[in-house]
Image: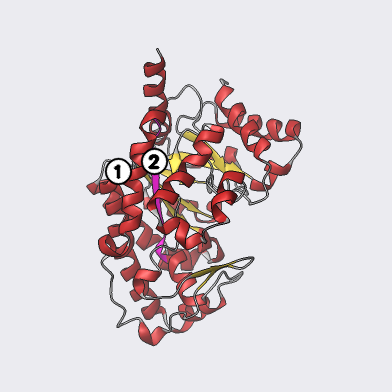
């Protein structure tokens, strides 16, 4: 009986991505392996962030921490959306209180000579970690999600040099150097495809594209500089692999028709989106994931539980719903509230 239940467990996330009816929605969190966990902090005391993602044994241990602690329905590879930056020859450092910093941001005149790297060779540590994690996940009977930063978001960091509230330099390129920006996005798209291919070859069972900074563009610029490249990646994955792929970007509703046209298996919804509204607009063959505000994890338990159940009730008659956050979990999140949400979702039966 235990083996049967575990066999069913591995299917709930993948079934939801296929828009099959499930007993309850599956649950996992963006950034579920991370700084809010003491086990992560214990490792962080002795290793910097790049060492942690670059050492397969450490990446494996960290990936499994939230599975052991909370019982999520899927594991997501512990890595970073900017893994492709260094293979392109850019420096990358994670500075405390600042985040990722690239000291030598790209200049428009350098794009033509920029070479597409050998991803299999340059990112071998990621694929080794995937193999190790899959092996360690066997007793848990849950799937492993691989991911990549999307071309526009990765390009934004490479151009700006750090996180930017308004993408001032990128938007200068849009107005003055659009051809160079398209050239960079084309090269990154090739590398993202290579990167996802190798993750699938190593054993991931689902994929997610993170286009965090897409929400800072106008509709017209999203259509020009984001949608074609996401569509190319999604089309490649869905044609070549039997592996579902989800797309996440902020301000989902502003670009919803374009996201639907990109045709991923699922759309990950930010916390500002009205679930009632979006579920009526997205085809029933496309999964929806989200969209609890990460800051609600700081609420009183009764308020938090109420909001979780409210979302579950809204989506209860809609196959293909995956409970998640509307963005990544925050570093100071109370772990007891993470457990409360997981337990609430896993006990929900509508």
Direction from residue 168 to residue 203 in the image, left or right: left
User: Where is residue 281 shown, x and y percent of the image?
Assistant: 50, 42
Residue lying farthest to the bottom in this orientation: 109
Mark-to-mark CA distance, 1 and 2: 8 Å
> How far from the left and from the top, in percent, is residue 333?
67, 46
Image: 110 above or below 317:
below
In the rendered image, the quadrant that contains the C terminus is top right
Task: Return the x and y of residue 105 as percentages of the image width and height.
Answer: 47, 79
Which of these two is toward me, 27 or 265? 27
Residue at x-position 54% and y-position 57%: 46
Q: Nearer the viewer, residue 151 or 76?
A: 76
Q: Give the SS element for disc 1.
A: loop
**Vertical order, 4 against 15 (above or below):** above
Give the extent of the magenta segment. Answer: 141-151
Residue at mark 2: 144
Q: Is residue 160 magenta?
A: no
Q: Quadrant of residue 316?
A: top right
Q: Residue 203 bears which disc, if any? A: 1
Question: In which image quadrant can residue 145 be found?
Answer: top left
């Amino acid at each position: 009986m235990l083996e049967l239940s575990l066999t069913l467990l591995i299917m709930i996330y993948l079934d939801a991505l296929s828009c099959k009816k499930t007993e309850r929605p599956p649950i996992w969190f963006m950034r579920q392996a991370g700084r809010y966990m003491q086990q992560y902090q214990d490792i962080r005391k002795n290793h910097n962030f790049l060492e942690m993602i670059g050492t397969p044994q450490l990446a494996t241990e960290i990936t499994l921490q939230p599975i052991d602690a909370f019982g999520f329905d899927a594991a997501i590879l512990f890595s970073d959306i900017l893994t492709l930056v260094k293979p392109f020859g850019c420096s990358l450092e994670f500075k405390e209180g600042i985040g990722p910093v690239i000291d030598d941001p790209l200049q428009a005149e350098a794009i033509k000579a920029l070479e597409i790297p050998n991803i299999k060779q340059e990112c071998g540590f990621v694929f080794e970690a995937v193999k190790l994690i899959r092996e360690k996940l066997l007793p848990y009977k849950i799937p492993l999600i691989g991911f990549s930063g999307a071309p526009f978001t990765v390009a934004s960091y490479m151009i700006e040099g750090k996180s930017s509230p308004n993408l001032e330099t990128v938007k200068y390129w849009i107005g003055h150097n659009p051809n160079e920006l398209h050239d960079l996005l084309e090269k990154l798209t090739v590398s993202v495809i290579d990167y996802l291919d190798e993750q699938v070859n190593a054993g991931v069972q689902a994929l997610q594209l993170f286009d965090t900074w897409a929400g800072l563009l106008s509709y017209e610029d999203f259509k020009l500089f984001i949608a074609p490249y996401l569509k190319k990646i999604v089309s490649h994955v869905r044609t070549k692999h039997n592996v579902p792929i989800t797309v996440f970007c902020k301000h989902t509703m502003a670009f919803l028709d374009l996201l639907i046209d990109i045709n991923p298996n699922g759309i990950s919804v930010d916390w500002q989106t009205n679930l009632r509204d979006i579920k009526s607009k997205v085809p029933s063959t496309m999964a929806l994931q989200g969209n609890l505000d990460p800051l609600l994890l700081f609420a009183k338990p009764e308020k938090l539980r109420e909001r979780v159940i409210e979302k579950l009730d809204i989506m209860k008659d809609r196959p293909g719903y995956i409970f998640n956050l509307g963005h990544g979990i925050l570093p100071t999140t109370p772990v007891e509230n993470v457990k409360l949400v997981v337990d609430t979702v896993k006990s929900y039966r509508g």
